[in-house]
Structures are given as C-alpha cells and as structure tokens.
Image: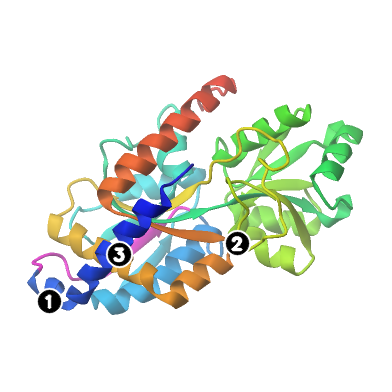
Amino acid sequence: MKFNRRSSLAALAGAALGAAWFPQAYAQAKDYTGPIRILVGFNPGGATDVVARQIGDKLKDLLSQVVIVENKPGAGGMIATQQLKAAPADGSTVMLTIDHTHLIVPLTFKAPGYDPAADFTALAGVANYYNALVVANSLNVKNMAEYGAWLKAHPGQANYGVGAAGSVAQFSGQLLGQSLGVKMVAVPYKGGAPLVQDLLGGQIPAGIVSLTDAIEHHRAGKLRIVAVSGAARAKATPEVPTFTELGLKGLDKNPWLAFFGPRGMPPEFVDRFTKAVAAVLRQPDMNEKLAKIGNEVLYATPEQLQRDWVVSTTRHWAPVVKESGWELQ
C-alpha cells in the first residue's frame, strides 16, 4: 500500500521528543511491569520473527522489562492471533503481525476466530516490507521476461509457493498470472522460511515471499529475485525491478508489519509501549538492520495504524479477493 512518508516521519519525530523524557514517563505509568510476550504467527527464522527479535532486544532495555518472543506458527498466523485475542489486556502480551494475518485472513476464512475491527488494540506501525518473486536456480532464468517464457514453455509447472493459504502473496501470484497470461497455481507453506528451503532444494520452481526471507540467498547467488512489489525499488536490492516497472498491474502495494495487543489495553501501557517502539526505530543501527533485510521503517502511531494502514489495506485487497473467486475456507 502507499504510505505517506512525510506524516510517518513527522510522527516518528514527535515520538522522538517524547523519548527524551521516556524514563520519567515510565516511572509515572502505573501499569504492567512484568515480562512482555511478543507473539509471532510464523516459524523461527522467518521474516516476522527476525524483526520481532531485533526490536524485542531493544525494547527490553528501554522498558526495563523482560521481553520474550514466542512463536506460534500455523494457519497463516491465525493460531497466534487467536491467542492474542484471548490474552489478558494488561500489557503482558502483544503481537508483531503482518497485514495478511490481521486483515486478509478474515477475508478468506469463514471463522478465523477474531474480528480485526473489534478484538484488538492498535499499538504501533513498524515497517513497510516488500514481497519478492523468487525463482530456483534450476530454472536458469535471469529476469521476468525469461521467467514468463519459461512458464509458457512449462504450463504444467506454473506453480508458486506462498507462506500461507489465502495470503497477499497468493493473490499477488494470481494478479501476476493474469498479467502474464498464464494460470498460476499457489502452493501454501507454513511460513516463508520452509518455502525458501524448498526453493533452495529445487522442490518448487518459484515462490512469492518477503524480501527478508530471500535476500541473503539472492546475494549469495543461491536463488534469484526477479521482481519486487512496491512503487519504487527496494533500497536493499536496487538491481531488482518492481512489478510495476515491468508493466505488471496491481502489484504496487507493499505489505506491512505492526504491533497489536488485546482489546482494552490500559492507555498508560499503550502510550509507554508506543513511545518505546518509536525510540527503537529511531536508533541508526536498528534502522540499518531493518533496511539491510528489505524493510523500510515507517513508524505509525496507534491512530495512524488504524486509520491509514488497516482501513486502506482492507479497501485495496477486499475487491481483489472477491474478484479472484476465492471460496471461504
């Protein structure tokens, strides 16, 4: 999706001013001060997990609390999200999630077990990331034109892996197939990490995963990224064109990472946690780490997260899901 960088930076700057008095604010806040559990709906080593651990390491110092990342993979993040909904709203549990889990799953499953509009507290937007079309080296293709030619020469092998059924990646693959004039068949995995392993082993010819999941293998020459989502090229892979550059429509929206908590969290905790996340994202080393693995830091306040990210993402993908003919699972 298209975020307003100027408003994001302004929000981050405002939070930065708050960071100067962060210790005093912490001392005044009468809220939960025990261990904080960060739920992640995917396997260890995956893109969301990597970011959660990097941010969590910084949060524990700023908050002076134990911060634990807990992986609850399965069902495209539904299991972890259901646990978040059921968790106490005292500040002991938050979740670093992606737009797929928070918004797309309720559009593609009959009974996801949660309502994104009613069951959660928006905390902080963290980053905008890129989806990448990755091909196995066994295909011996170097760019999108060659991949398109390979697909037409091998119509029975036009399958692509995705990190979860009914995900943004899956619908992106369908849009890609429409642009190329090829029927693409999605193969769901339990996260991006196992999909990348199968790409490395040549068990599947292609996949759409987060840039974070594939970037190191691309740099090492073990896989090839032929295109990325977004309106502009990713800074981490300036040599890789966007789908839009290549004339492929509907793939200019980038997914995002954000923190949510259970419904009804204390305002004191929300304020303190949000300021802490903003302070973490301001740190040059954190900004550099996230950028290196294909993320673009875009801090959002709770209000911006709900208004600008959640609502607009739903408006973009809801008609795509409907037009795809997707049957509710």
Instruction: Choose mark 1 or mark 2, whichever is in front.
Output: 2
Q: Is residue 173 left or right of residue 80?
A: right
Kind of residue indicated by mark 3: Ala
Looking at the picture, tell me which residue is in the foreground, 205 or 198.
205
* Residue 289 among magenta residues: no
- Place of residue 123 in the rendered image (x, y in percent of width and height, measured from the top left): 28, 53
Q: Which mark is residue 13?
A: 3
Q: Is residue 153 left or right of residue 227?
A: right
From the image, tell me which residue sits under label 1.
24
Within 10 Å of disc 2 (Cα), the crowding (few <14, some 14-19, many 20+) is: some
Please, what secondary structure does the residue beneath circle 2 have? Answer: loop
Quadrant of res 17: bottom left
Kind of residue indicated by mark 1: Gln
Question: How far apart are the two marked residues, 1 and 2, measured between alpha carbons?
Answer: 37 Å
Kind of residue indicated by mark 2: Lys
Residue segment shown in magenta: 29-41
Q: Which mark is residue 235?
A: 2
Q: Determine the residue positioned at 7% across, 71% down.
A: 28
Question: How far apart are the two marked residues, 3 and 1, measured between alpha carbons?
Answer: 19 Å
Instruction: Say which label, 3 or 1, has the lower sequence index.
Output: 3
